[in-house]
């Protein structure tokens, strides 16, 4: 699996050009891309600037030798490269297992080209087929929001930390609910509905945002475009 992740990360490098501002996603596949991009910067003196979507991406980019800028320091983001949890046939996504979904959506949405890295296991017939939808919420409202989500025939659980007691805390100081849906028929509508709940900061449905999805397979990398 790691070799497939490296393969698709190398393919994404082909979209990077000198002078670009690059949105740097969060997750294990994107981590390979960041390391490879850093190597390119060091060996070929490529001038690029990275806009990280999380503390994890920021620390790794600095370690890899990529100059970092914040979102408010740039006029535009040329490309963003990020991973995903699910991809449907229309290239709608579920993202957020790394709890960085809010900054990911802000940066990915503003990119001139949003490139998604995936493997075949992430391809689904409809969103919600395999993975829950992560929802970033204000801590004081998490229980009320979890109950309200039941209106959509979904069940939501507070995400707990695996290496600490208590809930996962996002980079923004919020909690994450993982909402399991039977089936998401209309991703755009559900994305809007969830964000309309008071106390919801952002949710992990990324509808109509991805431009290119690079899928790692045993036969090579398959390119899907909107």
Image (cartoon, rainbow, N blue to C red):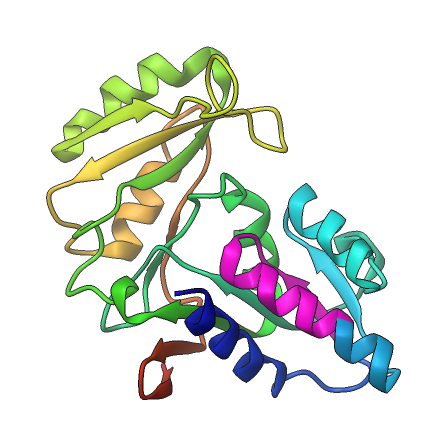
Q: Residue at x 26, y 51 (%)?
A: 189
Q: Position of residue 204 (x, y in %)?
A: 39, 46
Name the residue at 51% across, 24% down. 163
Write down the region rendered in magenta.
21-38
Magenta stretch, main secondary structure, is helix
The residue at 75%/63% (across/down) is 50
- Name the spot of residue 4 as percent of width and height, x first: 42, 73
Quarter of the image with the N terminus in it: bottom left
**Vertically, is 12 above or below 178?**
below
Q: Quadrant of the C terminus?
A: bottom left
User: Residue 84's quadrant in the figure?
Assistant: bottom left
Q: Quarter-wise, where is residue 200 in the image?
A: top left
- Disc tally is 0
User: Can the viewer see residue 20 in this picture?
Assistant: no
Apparent side of residue 7 relative to residue 220 in the rendered image (left or right): right
Q: Who's the residue at 38% across and 25% down the image?
A: 159
In this view of the protein, which residue sits in the foreground, 211 or 37? 37
Residue 224 lies in magenta, yes or no? no
Q: Residue 74 in the image: state x and y as whole percent.
A: 81, 63
Residue 101 rendering spot, x and y as whole percentages: 50, 45
Q: Is the residue 13 above or below the residue 25 in the image? A: below
Lateral position of residue 3 relative to residue 123, left or right: right
The reply to whether the magenta stretch includes residue 28 is: yes
Question: Foreground residue, 191 or 24?
Answer: 24
Q: Quadrant of residue 64?
A: bottom right
């Amino acid at each position: 699996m790691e070799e497939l992740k490296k393969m698709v990360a190398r393919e994404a490098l082909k979209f990077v050009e000198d002078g670009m501002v690059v949105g740097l996603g969060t997750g294990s596949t994107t981590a390979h891309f960041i390391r490879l991009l850093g190597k390119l910067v060091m060996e070929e003196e490529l001038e690029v600037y990275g806009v990280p979507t999380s503390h994890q991406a920021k620390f790794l980019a600095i370690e890899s030798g990529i100059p970092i800028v914040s979102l408010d320091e740039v006029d535009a983001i040329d490309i963003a490269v990020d991973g995903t949890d699910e991809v449907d046939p229309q290239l709608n996504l579920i993202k957020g297992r790394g709890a960085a979904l809010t900054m990911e959506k802000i940066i990915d949405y503003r990119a001139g080209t949003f490139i998604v890295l995936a493997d075949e296991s992430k391809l689904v017939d409809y969103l919600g087929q395999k993975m829950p939808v992560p929802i970033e919420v204000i801590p004081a409202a998490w229980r009320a929001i979890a109950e309200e989500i039941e209106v959509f025939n979904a069940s939501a659980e507070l995400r707990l930390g695996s290496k600490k007691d208590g809930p996962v805390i996002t980079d923004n100081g919020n909690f994450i609910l993982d909402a399991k849906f039977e089936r998401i028929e209309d991703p755009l509508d559900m994305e809007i509905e969830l964000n309309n709940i008071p106390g919801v900061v952002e949710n992990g449905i990324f509808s109509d945002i991805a431009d290119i999805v690079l899928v790692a397979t045993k036969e090579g990398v398959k390119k899907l475009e909107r």
